[in-house]
Every structure is written in C-alpha cells, then in structure tokens.
C-alpha cells in the first residue's frame, strides 16, 4: 500500500525497546510527514539513539509498531528498512580508510545496477564539493569532519525518503556544522524527510519544522519550531516541569 497524502511517512506507536532486559523506551509515539525535518532532542541517556536504532531495525522492538510509507516495518532488518527508503546514519560510523572516497560510496549502493549506482554516487557527491574534490583519495586522507560528511553521503546514495541522522555535528568545527545544516536544508528542499538527533539546540531548532523531546524514554514535549518560548519549554521539559508524558506512569 502506498502512503496517502494524509498518512505520515513514518509513524511510530507505543514503541518499547531497550537492551536485553533493560527497557529504555517506554511507549514512544512519533510521526514524520513526507519532506518534514524533525529534531529529536533530550538530555544524555534519554533514549534518542535507542529510538533511531529500534526504528531502523538495529534493535528489537519489544512492543508497539513502526510503519513507514504505509507498510508495517516493525522488526524489519536494517537492510529491509533501507530498501524501503528509511536510512539511518549511525553515530560515530567509520568510513573505510584504505579504499577511495568513491569506493566508499559505491559500497553503500552495493545492490544497485552499475549505471544507477554511478549516478547515485555523483548525486551524493554533489552535496559535498569538498569531498568530491578528493574522490580518488583514500577515505583516510579526509579530515575527521570530512569523513563524517562522507557517512552522510553514503546514506544519500540510498536516495532515502527519510534520512535519520544521529548527531551529525558531533566533533565538527562550527564551519562544518553549518555545512551539515545547509545540506539538511537542501535535502528538505528536495522533499527528503529528516530525523535529526542533535545536541546543538539552536542549530536543531533552526533546521527543523518540529521537535520531540525525550526524557527517560518518554516523549515529554512535541512542538512546532514556530512556537514561542521553545527553548524555555524544552528546558522545563528536561527538568520534569512540562506536563504531558512524564505524568503518565512508566510501563512495567
Ligand atoms: P546521548 O545523547 O548521550 O547519545 P541518548 O539519548 O542517545 O543519549 P541512548 O544512547 O539511547 O541515549 O541511551 C539510553 C539509555 O540506554 C542509557 O541509559 C544508556 O546507558 C543505555 N544504553 C545505551 N546503549 C546501551 C547498550 N548497548 N547496552 C545497555 N544499555 C545501553
């Protein structure tokens, strides 16, 4: 079934997940519309990375449902999710340092027909001129920040309908952070939806259409970034003063 205009691209309902017996997410409801940029915020340890992992199939979903593009993808493998158009660029992902930049990108499109794969690599490189310049060099010849951008470019080779970025700015210089944000703006202009986990609140609010705040595995706030006083409301939510989900009892 295809997504109708009214249906979100990603729809997560009552999601519970964690690590073995350790439950981290206690029933998350989360939606992303086609072409929307959504920031997922929250203090360290809130469960943001866990949430992305559970959605993209890297962690088992213990309860709840994940729908993407009108299909139930709960507990689908990361490969199946990526084939459906949901691509997760994991935090701290490393590139292959002993093969060329181009080969790193070709690997990301391993299952595509040769001509299509070459076209996708060019398309991904067009977002990152600084990497395109070094396409014949080893991945290891790129700076740390450029390697991080290469991991985003690898995600773009999949031509995602939804790209989930886990702290893409971590460890980047302010100039490179702005480069990443400008790529997010370009992707949004092309209709790609994005979920952005980001510690830099100002950057996240500037880039996103909506935000969700997660605290201790609960959604405590969701809002449009156009709403007033959002930084103050987020701060209150982090410290437990915003009503909504924190008032609900934790799932056993
Ligand atoms: P950060 O901003 O620090 O990355 P986060 O919101 O992404 O935080 P998670 O990394 O999802 O948070 O962690 C949520 C909880 O799950 C934390 O209590 C963390 O200690 C725990 N956790 C994370 N990874 C594992 C793991 N591999 N095994 C067990 N517990 C884990």
Image: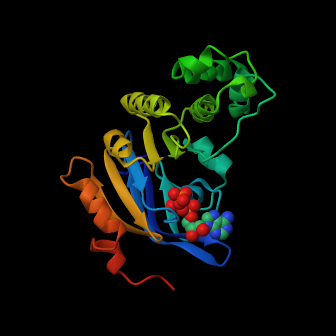
Residue at left 49%, top 39%?
Answer: 161
Residue drawn 74% across and 18% down? Answer: 137
Q: Is residue 35 above or below residue 73?
A: above
Seen in the image, is 242 located left or right of residue 30?
left
Q: Is residue 159 in sight in this rendering?
A: yes
Q: Specify the quadrant of the image occupied by residue 235.
A: bottom left
Q: Quadrant of residue 214?
A: bottom left
Does 16 appear above or below 148?
Answer: below
The quadrant of the rendered image in which ligand 1 is seen is bottom right
Residue 121 percent location from the top left of the image: 63, 22
Count up the numbered dots.
Answer: 0
Q: Which residue appears farthest toward the left when viewing the image?
A: 228
Residue at figure coordinates x 31%, y 44% from the top left: 209
Q: Position of residue 68 (x, y in %)?
A: 49, 51
The answer to whether residue 69 is left or right of residue 224 is right
Q: Position of residue 205 (x, y in %)?
A: 33, 45
Q: Residue furthest right?
A: 98
User: From what the image shows, is residue 169 above or below residue 216?
Assistant: above
Q: Where 165 falls versus 15 (above or below)? A: above
Q: Nearer the viewer, residue 28 or 130?
A: 130
- Identify the residue at horizontal 44%, vertical 42% (top origin): 194
Q: Position of residue 40 (x, y in %)?
A: 42, 54
Residue 60 visible in the picture: no
Q: Nearer the viewer, residue 160 or 154?
A: 154
Seen from this angle, which residue lies furthest front? Answer: 173
Along the viewing direction, whichever of 65 and 97 lies nearer the viewer: 97
Q: Nearer the viewer, residue 68 or 136?
A: 136
């Amino acid at each position: 079934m295809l997504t109708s205009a009214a249906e979100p691209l990603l729809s997560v309902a009552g999601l519970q997940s964690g690590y073995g017996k350790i439950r981290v997410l206690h029933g998350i409801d989360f939606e992303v519309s086609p072409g929307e940029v959504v920031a997922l915020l929250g203090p360290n340890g809130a469960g943001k990375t866990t949430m992305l992992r559970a959605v993209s199939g890297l962690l088992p979903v213990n309860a709840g449902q994940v729908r993407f593009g009108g299909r139930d993808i709960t507990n689908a493998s990361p490969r199946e999710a990526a084939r459906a158009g949901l691509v997760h660029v994991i935090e701290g992902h490393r590139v292959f340092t002993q093969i060329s930049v181009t080969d790193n990108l070709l690997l990301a499109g391993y299952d595509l027909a040769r001509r299509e794969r070459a076209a996708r690599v060019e398309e991904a490189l067009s977002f990152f001129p600084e990497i395109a310049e070094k396409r014949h060099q080893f991945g290891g010849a790129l700076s740390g920040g450029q390697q991080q951008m290469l991991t985003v470019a690898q995600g773009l080779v999949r031509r995602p309908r939804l790209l989930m970025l886990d702290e893409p700015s971590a460890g980047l210089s302010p100039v490179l952070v702005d480069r990443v944000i400008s790529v997010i703006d370009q992707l949004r202009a092309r209709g790609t939806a994005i979920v952005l986990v980001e510690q830099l609140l100002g950057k996240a609010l500037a880039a996103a259409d909506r935000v969700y705040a997660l605290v201790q595995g609960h959604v405590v706030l969701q809002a449009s970034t156009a709403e007033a006083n959002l930084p103050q409301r987020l701060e209150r939510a982090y410290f437990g003063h915003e009503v909504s989900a924190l008032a609900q009892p934790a799932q056993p």
